[in-house]
Image (tube, grey):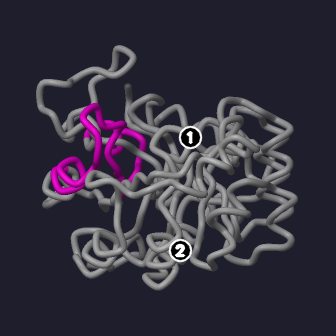
Amino acid sequence: MLELEHGFRVVDVHAHLVPDASAVAVRGREVGPDRLERECRQAGIVQAVVSPGQADDGGYLRSNNAVARLSVDRPFLAFARLDGPRDARDRPAARLRNLTATRRDHHASPSDVEQYAYDDRFHGFSLDPATDGLPDEETMEALADADLPVFVHAGQSFSPGTAVATVVRYGMPVVLRSFGGHPLDRELMHEAIDLLDDHDRLYLDTSGVRFREVLERGLLEHPDRVLFGSAAPAVHPNVAVMELLTLDVSADALRRAFDKNPSRVIAGLAPGAG
């Protein structure tokens, strides 16, 4: 694809890397770091937040370290993906099981969080509770103490309301991926926008939203709380950038989503950082 020329400084808060060099395709698209860097450059993206895809063998220590290593000398910021023993579903049976849930060796621990937080290779954390489980109370408290941004995969399997009750309440900056409505749940996306009124450190990323009126509502009502995310490599960054460029919003609103808001939430994305 041809390189986009849009005149904005663009940073991407949502991309994935698969560290295994032999795993070169997800849904038919390559996911190696060189390909991802090239596609970001084509879209005019100067930096991207990257975290591991889903682990097959339990635990993310190896994947996190590999993503951090692959980010060196590339325009990537590594985020550590964390798992946990608690069932993230908001159901009576899940709540009952969580009373006796025990952290296993491969689950993220408070010491893991502390290690990542003080390792300058990592700039924040990523949670996908519906896939990986939710960290236990001690680990969540360690995340609160670290006070680094936490990206949360939210949607039909882990609603924005559940995210508020289990993650946002700890007080660190939290970004709900896909406006909290994965996959393509318009009602949940609007619910997430409503939650911004009551939670000052809650943000939304634009990855996979696809609904113009939802994106425009978020950008118009909360211009300081929306961050651009592409969900690359599942979505080509060119496509994700164009989805925002075609919205009926001001250039200032786009500039905030593409650059100012992400740079404020994630210090490493600011111009001249690092």
Quadrant where the image shows the C terminus: bottom left
Q: Is residue 222 left or right of residue 172?
A: right
Q: Is residue 65 magenta?
A: yes
Q: Which of 49/54 is in front?
A: 54
Quadrant in which residue 57 is drawn: top left
Residue 15 visible? The answer is yes
Please report whichever mark, 1 or 2, sits nearer to the chain's N-terminal start. 1
Query: Residue 69: x and y, percent?
Result: 13, 56
Query: Residue 46: x and y, percent?
Result: 36, 57
Q: Which residue is mark 1?
A: 130
Quadrant where the image shows the N terminus: top left
Badge 2 marks a residue whose secondary structure is helix
What range is drawn magenta here? 38-66
Q: Which of 224/135 is in front?
A: 135
Q: Is residue 85 left or right of residue 95?
A: left
Q: Is residue 179 above or below residue 116?
A: above
Q: Is residue 71 magenta?
A: no
Q: Which residue is mark 2?
A: 265
Spatial CA span between label 1 and label 2: 24 Å
Name which residue lies at 44% across and 70% down.
139
Name which residue lies at 83% across and 62% down.
195
Query: Residue 113: x and y, percent?
Result: 34, 72
Name the residue furthest front. 100
Amino acid type of the residue tagged 2 in the rendering: Val
Name the residue furthest top. 28
